[in-house]
Image (spheres, rainbow, N blue to C red):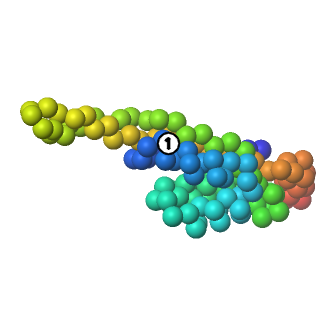
Amino acid sequence: MEAVARLRNYPTSPRKMRLLADLIRGKNVEEALGILKFSPKHNSVALEKLLLSAIANWGVKNEGADVDGADLYVKTIMVDGARVLKRMQPAPQGRAYRIRKRSNHVTIVVDSRNAVAVEANATENQETE
């Protein structure tokens, strides 16, 4: 069973966030966390927290399953544009330049590569209780 985590209205441009999202798409969770941990980009902190949240959501959704033995991977990661704050900056000769402060929404879907084994373990644990 897959688990989803969402980050809404994060104040950075979607283009910058997509650079990080492309690095971890399809990777194992441990490898993705390592990439985000040592990335110099400021967005990596928020994306790392979001990935940890998705892993925790997977653990809650699959109660009897072991998170470490599940071989989790980033199944899907989407970065969409969110609201844009529009500001004006004074410019020469009485003009004004438009500043667009962008934000984004990020959605991460985490799933297990061996879903059949995870479901079997979960049903065994429920039967023993």
Question: Quick check: 111 left or right of 119?
Answer: left
Residue 104, image x and y in percent?
Answer: 46, 41
Residue 19, image x and y in percent?
Answer: 56, 48
How crowded is the residue under tag 1: few (<14 C-alpha within 10 Å), some, or many (20+)? some
Q: Residue at x 47, y 35 (%)?
A: 81
Q: Can you say whether 81 is above or below 16 in the image?
A: above
Report the quarter where the N terminus lies: top right
Question: Quick check: 69 left or right of 101?
Answer: right
**Residue at the outermost left position:** 94
Observer able to see residue 61:
no
Residue receiving disc 1: 15
Q: Can you say whether 38 is above or below 5 in the image?
A: below
Label 1: element kind:
helix
Question: Quick check: 115 left or right of 62?
Answer: right
Asked which quadrant contains residue 103, the reply is: top left
Asked which quadrant contains residue 84, the reply is: top left
Q: Residue at x 55, y 54 (%)?
A: 47
The amino acid on which the numbered mark 1 sits, given as a three-letter code, is Arg
Observer able to see residue 124:
yes
Q: Can you say whether 94 is above or below 110 in the image?
A: above
Q: Residue at x 71, y 63 (%)?
A: 30
Residue 105, image x and y in percent?
Answer: 50, 40
